[in-house]
């Protein structure tokens, strides 16, 4: 978010570096979710709870196109189907439509 608020040009070394790091991170998550349904394996864990915010709500503040990441998008759909997730979102922010795709 700071990089965007600084309005650096697209070719600025800092912006290029940050984007490269984000691309590598998303590629790692994409690969992992191509092997197992959840980040820590076959069971839903705290790793998933901690990772959902940056993959969903944070994208309202810092847009990220997840179109190239089908495993991440499928993962977010699985998370969104969980009754506990739906309940927590309804209680925590009933007017927010989660970014699950």
Image (tube, helix red, strand yellow):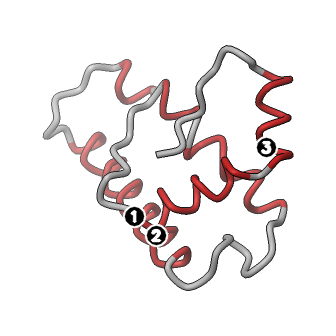
Judge left or right: residue 22 versus residue 54.
left
| Residue at the spot of label 3 | 85
Q: Earlier in the sequence, mark 1 or mark 3?
A: 1
Count of numbered marks = 3
* Dot 3 crowding, Cα within 10 Å, few <14, some 14–19, many 20+: few
Left or right for 70, reference 72: left
Q: Which mark is in front, 2 or 1? A: 1
**Label disc, if present, on residue 30 of the rendered structure:** 2
Q: CA distance from mark 2 to mark 1?
A: 8 Å
Q: Earlier in the sequence, mark 2 or mark 1?
A: 2
Residue shown at the point (74%, 81%) measured from the top left: 42
Q: Which residue, as the protein is rendered here, is positioned at the far top?
A: 95
**Residue at left 59%, top 25%?**
97
Nearest to the observer: residue 3 or residue 22: 22
Quadrant containing the N terminus in the rendered view: top left
Quarter holding residue 89: top right
- In the rendered image, residue 93, in percent from the top left (x then y), is placed at 75, 19
At horizontal 86% and vertical 45% (from top left) the residue drawn is 84
Say which element carries label 2. Answer: helix
Label 1: which secondary element = helix
* Residue 14 % position (x, y): 30, 42
Distance between the Cα atoms at labels 1 and 3?
21 Å
Identify residue for label 1: 70
Relative side of 39 to 24, left or right: right
- Tell me if label 2 and label 1 are in contact, CB under 8 Å: yes
Instruction: Answer with mark 2 or mark 3, whichever residue precedes in sequence.
Output: 2
Residue 15 against residue 40 in the figure, above or below: above
């Amino acid at each position: 978010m700071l990089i965007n608020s600084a309005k650096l040009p697209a070719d600025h070394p800092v912006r290029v570096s940050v984007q490269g790091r984000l691309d590598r991170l998303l590629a790692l998550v994409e690969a992992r979710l191509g092997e197992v349904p959840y980040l820590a394996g076959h069971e839903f864990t705290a790793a998933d709870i901690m990772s959902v915010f940056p993959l969903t709500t944070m994208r309202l503040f810092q847009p990220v196109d997840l179109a190239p990441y089908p495993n991440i998008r499928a993962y977010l759909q699985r998370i969104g189907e969980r009754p506990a997730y739906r309940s927590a979102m309804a209680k925590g922010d009933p007017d927010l439509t989660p970014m699950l795709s």
